[in-house]
Image: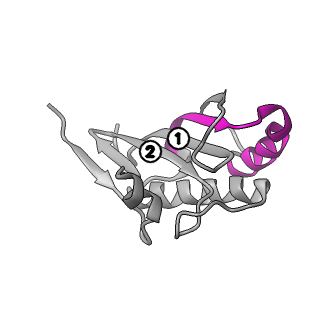
Amino acid sequence: MATSTPIFPAGRHALYERHRYSAALRSGDLLFVSGQVGSREDGSPEPEFGSQVRLAFRNLVAVLEASGCTLDDIVDVTTFHTDPATQFETVLVVKDEVFGHEPYPNWTAVGVTWLAGFDFEIKVIARIAGSS
């Protein structure tokens, strides 16, 4: 049975402590990253939506880096949106900045009614760098 190893970025965010979850779990050659939001270090949301999305991606990158991964190691993405109809164009702009070249990861976008005070969340599965 594979064991899971928790991963936390430097400057661990207050949300991990407050809600008692790991930023990511390494299991074998896979990294399962918990939903990342546009939270500041104190756990509060970035107020402007585009900035919140960019901060969520920066928080994601920090978790990936803590495990030795990069954005290129991502194989699956799920995003959650509180108002997809009005937010999706902004998300696509940031997505294109982050994933600017092929091959693109799988992507599933889900509309939700609540994200604990946030408007965007991204969770991913990545292959650990150096794994086959």
The quadrant of the image that shows the C terminus is top left
Furthest residue toward left: 1
Earlier residue among tags 1 and 2: 2
Residue 123 shows which numbered tag? Answer: 1
Chain part drawn in magenta: 73-98
Q: Nearer the viewer, residue 86 or 67?
A: 86
Residue 52 screen position, x and y as percent: 70, 56
Residue position marked by numbered label 2 in the rendering? 33
Q: Residues within 10 Å of mark 2 (few under 14, many from 20)?
A: many
User: Number of marks in the image?
Assistant: 2
Residue 68 in view (yes/no): no
Q: Quadrant of residue 120?
A: top right
Residue 1 screen position, x and y as percent: 14, 31
Residue 32 screen position, x and y as percent: 40, 40
Q: Residues within 10 Å of mark 1 (few under 14, many from 20)?
A: many
Q: Identity of the amino acid at label 2?
A: Val
Q: Nearer the viewer, residue 63 or 87?
A: 87
Is label 1 in a helix, a strand or a loop? strand
Check whether the beta carbons of the residues at disc 1 and disc 2 lie within 8 A of each other: yes
Residue drawn at (64%, 60%), measured in percent from left and top? 45
Q: Is residue 56 left or right of residue 53?
A: left
